Amino acid sequence: MRDKILFSIIVPVYNCENYIQACLESILSQTYSDYELIIVDDGSTDTSVVQIKEIIKDLPNCQLLLNQHGGVCKARNTGIQLAKGEYICLIDADDIVFNDYLESLASVILSNSPDVIYFQMKTGIDLSYIRCETTCPVILLDKNDINLLSKATLYHIPELYDRNSKLFGISSFSACGQIYKSDLFKKHNITFTEGITRSEDGLINLELLYYAETGAVIQKELYMYRTENNSATRSYKKDLVEVFRFRDECVKRIINTFYKVEYDDYLHMYYCSLIYELRAISENCIFHKNNNKPYVDKEKDFLCLINTSDYVQALHICSSDQLMPEDAKYLLFAQTGNVKKLIRYLAYTQSKRRLRSYIKEILIKTKLLGLIRKIRQKN
């Protein structure tokens, strides 16, 4: 029986000078040492590369590759192509991992060798990644569980929020919330779709899970998803309709290619995801405060969007009880075509979000947020 496993850790970097040091230090502090670290710079114009070279100098298991700017998908593909490890670990340059990240993963692999391993992700800005305790409950997944998770890459499923479900807490959309056997990428020639800038993680998970047969869930937080710099997710994106249109074409291609047996189920999940898209496009494009179009043009854009073919189908097929609460609201607005009510609702939700962020920042600074989470977990 083996006692070691080689991991390939891939970190794509683009202008992360404020975060890259903490990210790399958390990786280099791992209690498990059998890994290679492949850092792919995506054409950074800040001091990221200078910092990386200084941090990894004289470390034979670390390498830095310099790409021209081509996006995170291209950077990840470069790393995966060069990876020699049995498992691929994807870590974003502005996040950190706990120091028992690899040791916890290795323990599960050496006992069960699953195709995919999920773990809990912590969100926040706490940079404490040193932890001594390494034991944790592990749940094994069969092909039926994996099929459920493949549907969850398209849209949320109730099992992800049910504390009694073995799928509870899994981040089905993220490429960082799990690791995969490298053979799944290489034997089946699976790569990130270059040019996609939204929902690219869910897209590759949909392909990989088609081939995965076994899985495991580590019921412990191993990854810290940094939230202090997530304002970009709320920024104005004037080309968001085209971005999602490309993503939708890719999703339909994958469903048509791989998921013919449960085609109707997967197509329905796709239509549910379109309601989420509608919300994202409304908030971050059509009705964003930085969109300088006259109101009458914004209204026309919204009505034109919901009258395109796939959205018409989604509005006809989906029902509120199948959607997340925020998306259910948008379903109602789109079905009635009441743009004025939608704008009022947007103003309300944005004010509510700003207040929530302000309160959360205070709780983090006063260290009360961690205490609140522990109390919730016990209950």
Image (cartoon, rainbow, N blue to C red):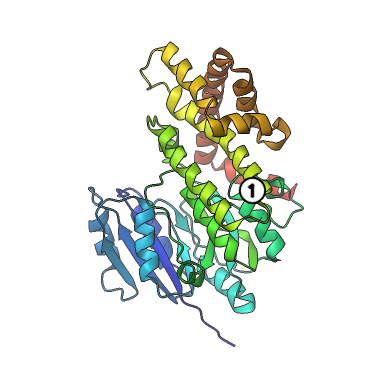
Q: State how many labels appear.
A: 1
Q: Name above or below for residue 367 compared with residue 301.
A: below
Place of residue 84 in the rendered image (x, y in percent of width and height, measured from the top left): 40, 75
Disc 1 residue crowd, few under 14, some 14–19, many 20+, Cα 10 Å: many
- Residue 16 appears left or right of 281: left
Taking 61 as reference, is 356 left or right? right
* Quadrant for the N terminus in the image: bottom right
Q: Looking at the image, which is closer to me, 63 or 273?
A: 273
| Nearer-the-camera pick, 239 or 72 | 239
Residue drawn 34% across the image and 57% down it: 75
Residue identified by numbered label 1: 266
Please provide percent x and percent y for residue 112. 64, 76
Q: Residue 211 appears at what percent x and percent y?
A: 58, 65
Against 162, is 277 above or below?
A: above
221, 202: nearer the viewer: 202
Give the amino acid at mark 1.
Tyr
Taking the image as shown, residue 96 lies to the left or right of residue 136, namely left
